[in-house]
Image: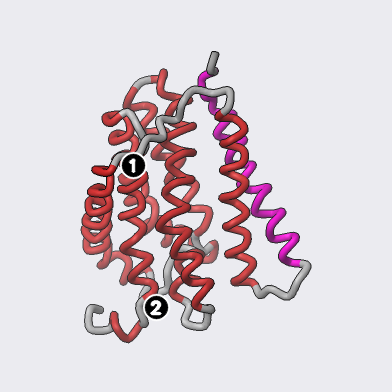
Amino acid sequence: MARPWRIVDFALVWLGGLAGALLAVTVAGLGTLDDTSLVVVGLGGQYVGNFVVLGVLARRRQSLRMTLEPGDVRYVALGILAQIAVAILLEPLARVLFPDGRPPQQIAEIISDPSAALYLKLAMFGAAVLLAPLAEELMFRGVLLRAIEPWSRWTAIGVTASVFAAVHLLGVDPERFWASALVVAPPILALGVWLGWLTMRKGRLGPAIFLHSGWNLVAAVVLLLPPEMLEPVG
C-alpha cells in the first residue's frame, strides 16, 4: 500500500538537491572551469539530486498527480501575462532599489552577463524555463502540498507558498538582501498561492508546471536581450 507523503520527504528531496550540487561542483572544480561555469554545473547537479531522491521516494509513496494534458499549454500564456503585469507594477520600486539595473538573483545575473558564454546562457535559460518549473512543482505543489494537505486547504496553500518564497530568497545578492527581498518575495509568494490553488482545483500538477514555465519565460527572454535593445523601454 502506498504511503502518504511527509514533510521529511520534502526535506530529503531538498537535501538531495544540495548534495547533488555539492558533488557536481566538487568534481567539476577539479578541472579548469570558471565560477560561472561552476554555478551552471552546480545547478544541474541540484536538479539531478532532486529527481533521484524523488524517484526513490515515489516508489513507496502516493501519486504526486504528475499528469500533463495538451490543454495545459495555455497556462504558459497566463504565466507570461502575470509576469508582465507584476513587472509593470514593481518597476517603480525596482528602479528605486536597483538604479543600476542589476538583477537581484544569481541565475538572472548569469543570463544577463554579456561576458558569459552563449552556451552557459542557454543552459541557464533552459533551467529557468524547463527544469525549474518541473522540479519545483514536484517538490512544492507535489511533495510538500500533499504532505500538509490534511491540515486544511488554505493552510496548506499558504504554508507551501511561504516556503516557496523563502527558498527563492536564498539566491539573492546577500549585500542587498532586504532590497532584493522587497522585489522578489511578494510576487513569488503570490505565485505560490496561485500555483497551490490551481493544483488543488485541478487535482494534478500539469497546469501549475506550465504556468510556472510561462512566468519564468518572460524574465529569461528579457535577460537574454542585449542591453541596448531595452534602453528605449527604460
- Pick the front one: 222 or 69: 69
- The magenta region covers 3-29
Q: Are marks 1 and 2 in contact (CB under 8 Å)?
A: no
Task: Choose the circle earlier in sequence order: 1 or 2.
Answer: 2
Q: Locate the N terminus and report the quarter of the image it occupies.
A: top right
Residue at (69% x, 57% y) in the render: 24
Q: Position of residue 208 (x, y in %)?
A: 33, 42
| Label 2 SS | loop
Tell me if 182 is positioned left or right of 1 in this view.
Answer: left
Q: Residues within 10 Å of mark 1 (few under 14, many from 20)?
A: many
Quadrant assignment, res 103 = bottom left
Q: Give residue 188's mark.
A: none
Q: Give residue 208's mark.
A: 1
Q: Which SS does the magenta portion mostly show?
A: helix
Residue at (39% x, 51% y) in the render: 185
Q: Give residue 100's mark.
A: 2
Q: Locate the C terminus and report the quarter of the image it occupies.
A: bottom left
Of tags 1 and 2, which is closer to the observer? 1
- Pick the front one: 82 or 101: 82
Residue at (43% x, 61% y) in the render: 180
Mark 1 to mark 2: distance in Å? 33 Å
Give the residue furthest to the front. Answer: 70
Give the residue furthest to the bottom. Answer: 228
Q: Amino acid at mark 2?
A: Asp
Q: Amino acid at mark 1?
A: Ala
